[in-house]
Amino acid sequence: MNQFTTYLVNRVISKGDNPLEPSNRLKVGKLEGYLSIFSNLFLFGIKLSLGVVSQSIALLADAFHTLMDVATSGIVILGFKLSQKPADAEHPFGHGRAETISSLLIAFLIGLVGIEFLKPSIGRLYNSEELMVDPRMIFIIVVTIVIKEIMARVSHEMGELIESDILKGDAVHHRSDMLSSLLVVVGLIGVRLGWPELDSYMGIGVSIFILYTGYELARNAVDELLGKPPTKEMIDSISAMAREVNGVLNVHDIIVHQYGVKKFISLHIEVGHDRTADELHVIADSVEDKIAKKMYANVVTHIDPVKIDGNIENDIMEMVSHIIKNDELGTIQDLRIIKEDEMVSNISFEIPCSVEFMQKDEVQIELNQQIYKAYPHCKIEIKFINQIS
């Protein structure tokens, strides 16, 4: 975070406190919301006054785009308050997705503003009006552009800090307002140079910016509600934390369900097959506690005992690794070998793959052929597990 954002955040939460703790998230979310409301009211007054004086359709559209930011910031605050409600019988996972629903409502309101200003912008092309543009007016709008960019950066950094899509969405809205103001400046300069129709074109451009912003916010919100997969960075972070626990050999099948900032995580950990039940219990608890504290999550682990020092295991691992050299396939996991009368009778393992991977049958046939050559009397079971990260 830059120094200005850090200063603002430190005004509401103590330095060193976990920003993901629910009460701290609420404080930061409300701070961003109120800052946006007061800043946008100020900017709306300036743009509306200049728009009325100049009769610029692009500037008037931009003014009401800014006013819509006031409404969306109010929804931000409401969404944060609702998301902090504790779990109940009807919502056992809490109300964290109230933030996402708020983002969807913001997107809808943004779309309405874009449509309402697209129509008069097109109409002005056929019914031109005389515009009054003062150079000082252009300078003032440039100042509002700088203010909007600062607001966009502060909102995004606060959103990153508390892992909030609604704050990141508000940041995108601020930036779209800034970009639309740039188009207004272009239109007003065009009027000064004798191209009054440029104002109408810039009004259309501002409306398109507004509509696109609404679309992006809606798409992200719908993805979140439908079950957007966790990022690769999040999966790698969970895996790294689990591997830090003594006794964990490998980690796979990580699943994350997210409800606002609250996460529900399940994962499989591989441990040595010679561990006692008590040792396995301690390892599992250690993994769960470590991840839960750092990621503010409920964590469940599944233990897979594995043998790691056998010649047959190493032979199969090497055999398979030569075949599955594909960016869409992961490393072999959950390898199981059963012997009867010193003969290998059963070999089973899993291969993680991307959801889009379509060559499972071809890979499985090739693996079966290679393994049968080395172990002709064994039964082979191969599962392809879709990765959701």
Image (cartoon, rainbow, N blue to C red):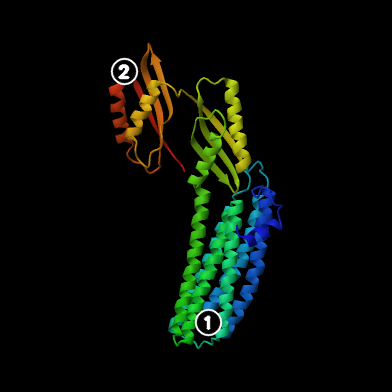
The amino acid at mark 2 is His
Q: Where is residue 196 in the image (x, y as percent from the top left)?
A: 46, 85
Q: Is mark 1 on a helix, strand or loop?
A: loop
Determine the residue positioned at 50% across, 21% down.
273
Foreground of the two, 59 or 93? 59
Determine the residue positioned at 31% across, 27% down.
368
Task: Using the image, determine if residue 186 lies above or below residue 311.
Answer: below
Q: 256 left or right of 292?
A: left
Foreground of the two, 185 or 55? 185
Determine the residue positioned at 48% across, 78% down.
186
Foreground of the two, 80 or 246? 246
Can residue 51 be seen here? The reply is no
Q: Position of residue 58 (x, y in %)?
A: 51, 77
Q: 370 left or right of 312?
A: left
Determine the residue positioned at 29% across, 19% down.
376
What residue did someone put label 2 on? 377
Among the two numbered marks 1 and 2 on one chain, the one whose residue lies closer to the N terminus: 1
Tag 2: Cα neighbours inside 10 Å, few (<14), some, or many (≥20)?
Answer: few
Asked which quadrant contains residue 286, the reply is: top right
Foreground of the two, 353 or 117? 353
Q: Are marks 1 and 2 in contact (CB under 8 Å)?
A: no
Q: What element carries label 2?
A: loop
Q: Which mark is residue 56?
A: 1
Image mark count? 2
Residue found farthest to the top: 341
Badge nearest the viewer, 1 or 2: 2
Can residue 1 be seen here? The reply is yes
Using the numbered discs, state the Cα–Cα distance from disc 1 to disc 2 in whole angstroms.
83 Å
Q: Position of residue 293 (x, y in %)?
A: 63, 40
